[in-house]
Image (tube, rainbow, N blue to C red):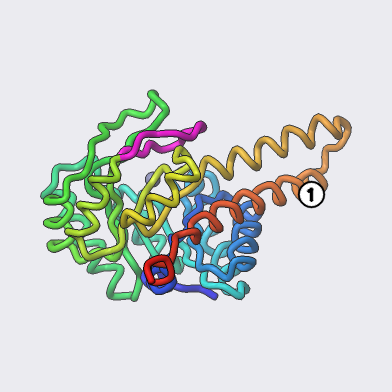
Amino acid sequence: MLCTLQEALQIALEKNQGLAAFNVYGFEDADPVVKAAEERQAPVVLMTNKAAVDHMGVGILAALLLRIARDSSTHVCIHLDHGTNVSVIREAIEEGYTSVMFDGSQLPFDQNVAITKEVVRMAHARGISVEAEIGAVGFSDPRIEFVARYSTAHEAQLFQKHTDVDALAVAIGTVHRMEEQGVALRFDLLREISHTVPVPLVIHGASGVTDGDLVRLIESGARKINLGTVLRIAFGTALRSQLSQHPKEYDRIKLFPACMQAVYEKALQKITLLHAIPDPVASNP
Ligand SMILES: [Zn+2]
């Protein structure tokens, strides 16, 4: 069933679990991600980024993903990831997305606050959730011009107070599009921010985080975990293997099932990890 980000976060909070959010690009990854979430009876977020929007447009993505969400037995949120201008955010809201992110991480603090407030006003009027970013999570690709910097607890608190966002992305060392795992994380900073800011915290670029650290992120106060590259690698590796195993096959419908299975298995593994937090009551009798 379709839900907002706020509803999905609330379910994850009540169960003391992390909320998995995956960047998807079409039916072949959205469908197996939702099936993995159903298997774990977990809420899940399907996110579309600028690359997906440039490829097929918000309207087609919305129609596809909303139908998958509505047909699902679990809670599925449809989220616009990294909206850097208000017009694409407005379009996503009009097309039925249940959550939007405004990314003002490259703007001065006051401008980030001002535009985020405008987005919150527009989205909340329609019951849609809003995520924003404080500090700036960088990119592993040096061709992307971007200034990365850690968040601070003080600015996160100030930002949240001024904007009333439903979720806040913070920069504690992760990097977008990492193909290897093992990035160094500032758990101390995450804990400090989570004690200061009363909204659920979001970690972008979690594909570069080891499985052990993924569990530690939730223990240290993160709630929504964004994953993209791990699924793209799973899909692409399976596709490459299919093509070499079947050099004469040209029909993608026959090549895709193995790729979808690979995405399903990777999504299931990551969702399971985000549920692996020891119950504080059970572990502390
Ligand atoms: Zn991101």
What residue range appears in magenta?
173-185
Q: On the picture, is 98 further left or further right than 31? A: left
Residue located beneath label 1 in the image: 253
The image quadrant of residue 222 is bottom left
Compared to residue 247, the image places residue 213 above or below, namely below
Q: Nearer the viewer, residue 76 or 154?
A: 154
Question: Which image quadrant: the C terminus?
Answer: bottom left
Q: On the picture, is 181 further left or further right than 88? A: right
Residue at 44 percent of width and 50 percent of height: 226
Residue at 56 percent of width and 49 percent of height: 25
Question: Which image quadrant: the N terminus?
Answer: bottom right
x and y, in percent, of residue 29 in the image: 62, 52
- Is any part of residue 87 visible from this angle? no
x and y, in percent, of residue 240 in the image: 73, 33
Point out the quarter of the image occupied by ligand 1: top left
- Give the amino acid at mark 1: Ile
Residue at 86 percent of width and 37 percent of height: 249
- Is any part of residue 164 visible from this angle? yes
The verdict on label 1 being within 8 Å of ligand 1 is: no
Residue at 64 percent of width and 56 percent of height: 27
Q: Is residue 56 magenta?
A: no
